Image: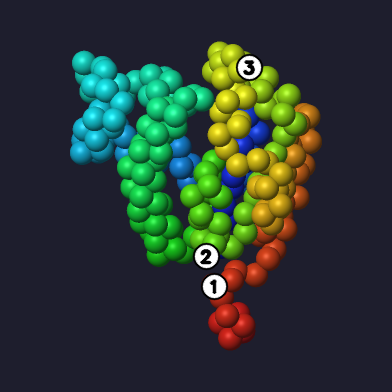
Amino acid sequence: MKVVGLTGGIGTGKSTVADLLRQRGWIVIASDETARSIMDTDQALQAELRAILGDDIQDEHGNMKRALIAQRIFGSTDESAARKRAVERLIHPRVLDAHMDLLLQHRDAGAPLVAIESALLYEIGLEDAFDWIIVVDAADDVRIQRVMERNGSSREDVLARINEQMPMSEKRGHADFVITNSTTRASLQQAVTLVATVIEALPDPETSPMDAD
């Protein structure tokens, strides 16, 4: 089974690329969705998060207040950075375990290819876990405008989020494939189709020449 990593910075449109790949028939596992599911169901994790971020990050029904969590872990202060690192240490191992279980399930089911969408693929050192990595990039002004319109964030807040991530030049330098998403949906669709076609045509690294015969 081929295992593909899909990553990019905030506002580059990696989730849109993931949706286009799903429409093509790919299995794409989104790390953000996995993390949200774990946060919503893992009571031990919820208790640990409250200890770091405050009891008010859950409402009276036990639902996580994601906007408040983001407010407390993203920012330019040392305190915000420390909270962010502490939260990541709690969540990332759980997400990795969940993804490993899903990959094994898909392999056992005979899936030919699975992609994992992760914004922090390089930051947490996962690049060697994939056969190929796709990086989605876009012009900075485009990224900033997208996030401002999507989240209602200020330009300064978006820039702070961008600056917390690995520079896109480094991500592109490590990538096997780069998809640029700065213009139209049609242009993005063409780029996704091209990259997907190439990956689908590549031999499965898990299949030895003898097995292929």
Q: What kind of element bears circle 1?
A: loop
Residue type at mark 1?
Glu
Instruction: Look at the image and tell me in which quarter the C terminus lies.
Output: bottom right
**Residue 170: horizontal and vertical position, in percent?**
68, 47
Tell me, what colour scheme is on the image?
rainbow
- Spatial separation of the CA atoms under disc 2 and disc 1: 6 Å
**Residue 108: horizontal and vertical position, in percent?**
40, 64
* 1 relative position to 172: left or right: left
- Spatial separation of the CA atoms under disc 3 and disc 2: 42 Å
Q: What kind of element bears circle 2?
A: loop
The residue depicted at 61 percent of the width and 37 percent of the height is 9
**Residue 182: horizontal and vertical position, in percent?**
76, 31
The residue depicted at 60 percent of the width and 42 percent of the height is 166
Mark 1 burial class by Cα count in 10 Å: few <14, some 14-19, many 20+:
few
Residue type at mark 3?
Arg
The residue to which callout 1 is attached is 206
The residue depicted at 33 percent of the width and 47 percent of the height is 94
Mark 2 burial class by Cα count in 10 Å: few <14, some 14-19, many 20+:
some
Between disc 2 and disc 1, whose residue precedes? 2
For residue 84, above or below residue 156? below
- Spatial separation of the CA atoms under disc 3 and disc 1: 45 Å
Mark 2 and mark 1 in contact? Answer it, CB < 8 Å: yes
Say which quarter of the image contains residue 105: bottom left
The residue to which callout 3 is attached is 155
- Asked whether residue 117 appears in the rendered view, the answer is yes
Numbered label attached to residue 1: 2
Mark 3 burial class by Cα count in 10 Å: few <14, some 14-19, many 20+:
some
Numbered label attached to residue 148: none
Between disc 3 and disc 2, whose residue precedes? 2
* 9 relative position to 173: left or right: left
Q: What kind of element bears circle 3?
A: helix
Say which quarter of the image contains residue 183: top right
